[in-house]
Image (cartoon, rainbow, N blue to C red):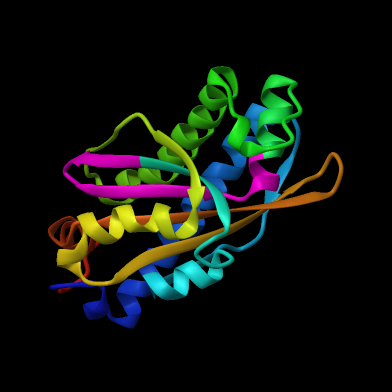
Amino acid sequence: MKNLDDLNDIQLDVLREIGNIGSGNAASALSTMLDRPVDISVPKVMVLDYNTVTESLGGPEELLVGLLLSLSGDVTGMIMFLLHKDFAHMMINTLTGMDLENVGDLDEFSSSAIREVGNIMAASYVNAIASLTGLNINISPPDLCVDMVGAILSVPAIYFANIGDKIIFIQDEFDKKANDNKTSSHILMIPEMDSLAKIMTNLGLEL
């Protein structure tokens, strides 16, 4: 397996199932953090090139909150959470009681709250992989940035150019039952190819 283009339909279905489990775990974690029920729609799990991801996120100049975490241990790579302004506002307002008009105005307190959200959601997906495969996976503390989509995606595009121009793209839509507000987040999973092969092998899939 040289790049994500080599994944067959069965392997893609496995990635979708991991995404489903991770999203369910994330919804439970958010519900606990917000102290209210949070439902999640069936996530869309796709393997897309960077240009398609950019357009799916609103174009290269769309402003997003990005949380980047590195994977280490038995699985190496990167996981990135991209939060739209409404999602970031909702989390900040609920967790801190603040009401920021601009996500670019994040102070240390609200930045810490968003980092904690990223850390908990990343753990939801990583724990899904670890529990299914028996692999030991560690995640780094999240790095936070508020920037345009084009700038944010340039980071994984440069660091993982050796595995091709495609990434695992997970789109989640959360529904807060308290006010029927729907918010969305996007997850980019970029495992090193030998790590992805290890995941597939531990799940009993032939490469």
Image quarter (top left, top right, bottom left or bottom right) of the N terminus: bottom left
Residue situated in front as seen by the camera: 62 or 120: 62
Horizontal and vertical percent position of residue 106: 59, 28
Residue situated in front as seen by the camera: 169 or 92: 92
Residue situated in front as seen by the camera: 183 or 206: 183
Q: Residue furthest top?
A: 109
Q: Which residue lies furthest to the right in this view?
A: 179
Horizontal and vertical percent position of residue 116: 50, 27
Horizontal and vertical percent position of residue 115: 48, 30
Horizontal and vertical percent position of residue 66: 47, 45
- In which quarter of the view is residue 159 placed? bottom left
Report whether 21 appears left or right of 139: right
In this rendering, the answer to whether 140 lies above or below 27 is: above
Image quarter (top left, top right, bottom left or bottom right) of the C terminus: bottom left
**Which residue is depicted at the point 41% across and 37% down?**
123
**Which residue is depicted at the point 38% across and 42% down?**
68
**Number of labelled discs?**
0
Span of residues in magenta? 69-88
- In which quarter of the view is residue 27 placed? top right
Is 71 part of what is drawn in magenta?
A: yes
In this rendering, the answer to whether 193 lies above or below 73 is: below
**Which residue is depicted at the point 13% across and 73% down?**
2
- In which quarter of the view is residue 5 placed? bottom left
Q: Main secondary structure of the magenta part?
A: strand
Report whether 152 appears left or right of 112: left
**Which residue is depicted at the point 46% across and 54% down?**
187
Is 58 part of what is drawn in magenta?
A: no
